[in-house]
Image: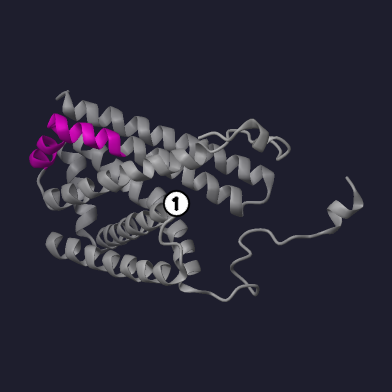
Amino acid sequence: MTNPLARARGHGSAKSGVHHWLAQRVTAVFLVFLAGWLAYAVLALAGADFATARAFVARPFNAALLVLLVISMFYHAMLGLQVVIEDYVHRPAAAITLHFLVRAGAWLGMALAVVNILIIALGA
Amino acid sequence: MKPAMKAKQRPLSPFMIGPYYKPQMTSLMSIAHRASGVFLSLVGAPLLLWWIVAVASGAEAYGALQTFFGNWAGQLLMAASLLGLFYHLFNGIRHLVWDSGRALDIRTAYTAGWLVLIASVLATAVMLGRML
């Protein structure tokens, strides 16, 4: 997604352009399908015992979808919370602190989720 | 800085809430989209993460999670997360359609808005009905 240079000139810094906007929407489209699958999984596993839940996640296809879901979800949440902070938190110190916490939380959540899904899938 | 530049005190977001605009269904659904997104980020996603960690950790951790979702507090959080998820999902599709340049007239925006609200409540009720 680019504009001709002649149209972009004189309108100020574009910084990263539409990257944030586009990433938010690409993850949104992924999540439309993955959230549908999550709803199915929640129904299938409601009240399930430990062995059933573990066997469900251990299936390679389910593990793969769950990995895709948590990566898209935490990334989408990170981008969304970033915009909320940019719009509503006007004190720079508070905004920077919150931006850091959101990014750290999202990446930590992503890493924790993927590692634990792999532990289940690999039967460790 | 030029004097003219700092003299003007423009309203800072969220100025839509307050005396300047009358609340409308479209603006309320817009702020509800953000609110549900923040709720899903701070409550829904951590609950899913807890479930994954519990399934990986063993029967004891999984049992603690089951006890939590057996309580009224756990069931309330589950119900709120499901409602938030379906609202954000359906309204998100409404936003994606708008992003493609379609359905931007006021009538369609309202019709789609009601569809989103009805579908969110229905989907949540059906899910809860089958889970309990």
Q: Which residues are magenta?
A: A50-69
Rendering quarter of residue B11: bottom right
Q: Give left or right: position of A71 versus A9.
A: left
- Which is more toward the observer, A15 or B82? A15
Q: Position of residue B31 (x, y in %)?
A: 49, 62
In this rendering, the answer to whether B87 lies above or below A110 is below
Q: How is the image coloured?
A: one colour
Which three-letter amino acid code belongs to the residue tagged 1? Asp
Q: Position of residue A92 (x, y in %)?
A: 68, 44
Categorize mark 1 by other alpha carbons within 10 Å: few (<14), some (14-19), many (20+): few
Taken as a whole, is the magenta stretch helix, strand or loop? helix
- Which is more toward the observer, A48 or A107? A107
Q: Position of residue A20 (x, y in %)?
A: 51, 39
Q: Is residue A106 visible?
A: yes
Pointer 1: what residue? B99
Residue at the limit of the structure toward the right, as seen here:
B3
Split into 4 quadrants, where in the image is the C terminus of chain A? top left
Magenta span includes B132: no
Magenta span includes A54: yes
Q: Give left or right: position of B50 versus B92.
A: left
Which structural element holds mark 1? helix
On what subunit does the disc labeled 1 rest?
B
